[in-house]
Amino acid sequence: MIIVLKLHSTDDEVARVEESVRELGYEPHTIRGEIRTVVACVGDETTHKSPEALETLPEVDSVVPIQKRYKLVSRDYCPDRHRVQVGNTSLGGPAFHVVAGPCSIETYDQTLETAYAVKASGATLFRGGAFKPRTSPYDFQGLGDEALDILARVKTEVGIPAVSEVLRASDIDRMIDVVDVFQIGTRNCLNYSLLEAVGSTGRPVFLKRGMSATVEEWLLAAEYLAKNGSPHIILCERGIRTFEKATRNTLDLSAVAVARLESNLPVFVDPSHAAGRRDLIPQLARAAVAVGADGLMVEVHPNPEEALSDAAQQLTPEMFTALMDEIAPFIQAAGREMAAPTEVSA
Ligand code: PEP
Ligand code: MN
């Protein structure tokens, strides 16, 4: 951090600031200008107390952070791209992965049919919500434990690892035997106690970007997971809140590019929740591949019109097959190959 002092500081004022910097555990290096003095704080900002508090000193004009506030997920600190191992496959390498499945697990047959279909079309991970974070308390909240039982049977029968959203730390214990990857949804991206609890499982985590989270906040959420024990994180951009009403959210492709530059984590795109309508999913999926995403998450339902949640955005299995065919040349043009099928982890 750099501490910028107020104009025309006296020697005593500079000395007071230097003393406060030392008290925080940093070594002050002072540069005296004609009218302005600045004090550089040398030390690791991620392990010392934040010098931001120094902004309250009467001698100080402003405090300018220099280091990134995230470390474990940062490419500056750890330049090698992190591969996330799930089952017999690894995400974040040259292979392009697609996670697909219904918004909600509704019945055994619906889940089984979708899992077989998406696997046959090339999805490597199956998604399905057991606990649903719904805007209205009157909307379908997910089948809960019953959905977990269905998911356990289906993933074993079909041979595909499962991703499912965790809403509460108290659900982790019953989910952990079924779920290969914990999903943290957009609404919980900044729920720090949940991030700590999920991180401490050491399991891979699919971290959706908060609908109003900046890229820095999203990466700091990932840092919570890594710091607490799970560096196996897949970031997912799923659209942010803007003034635009034509789509459910606004897919922020710039954030995908930034997240891939700033972090060492795989970055996925969810065109389903971004668009909120199925007719835009192929276009957004192609754009995601072109911008360098490592994979997609797509919602698929055997009868979308009967879906209990997110009906308008779910693809039929036939549409999903067409989508996979359509993105194949883009994946190749991006210098990647479609990932080989996965099997469930033991
Ligand atoms: C979901 O994946 O079904 C979901 C609720 O996603 P998001 O958190 O991105 O809204
Ligand atoms: Mn959904």
Image (cartoon, rainbow, N blue to C red):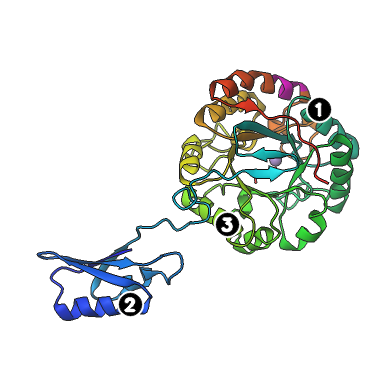
Label 2 beta carbon less than 8 Å to ligand 1: no
State whether residue 309 is above or below residue 285: below
Front of the two marks 1 and 3: 1
Q: Which residue is drawn at 79% across and 35% down?
A: 307
Left or right of residue 139, residue 112 in this image: right
Q: Which mark is residue 190?
A: 3
Q: In this view, does 328 lie above or below 312?
A: above
Q: Main secondary structure of the magenta part?
A: helix
Badge 2 amino acid: Arg
- The answer to which of marks 2 and 3 sits earlier in the sequence is 2
Crowd around label 1: few <14 · some 14–19 · many ≥20 (10 Å): many
Number of numbered markers: 3
Question: Where is residue 53 drawn, in percent x and y?
Answer: 37, 72
Q: Which residue lies furthest to the front in this view?
A: 80
Q: How far apart are marks 1 and 3 (CA)?
A: 34 Å
Disc 3: CA contacts within 10 A as few (<14), some (14-19) or many (>=20): many
Front tag of 2 and 3:
2
Please give the name of the residue rendered at 66% of the width and 33% of the height, measured from the top-left corner: 97
Amino acid type for the residue under numbered disc 1: Ala
Q: Nearer the viewer, mark 1 or mark 2?
A: 2
Q: Which amino acid does label 3 sit on?
A: Leu
Locate residue 332 relative to residue 26 in the image: left or right: right
- Residue 117 badge: 1
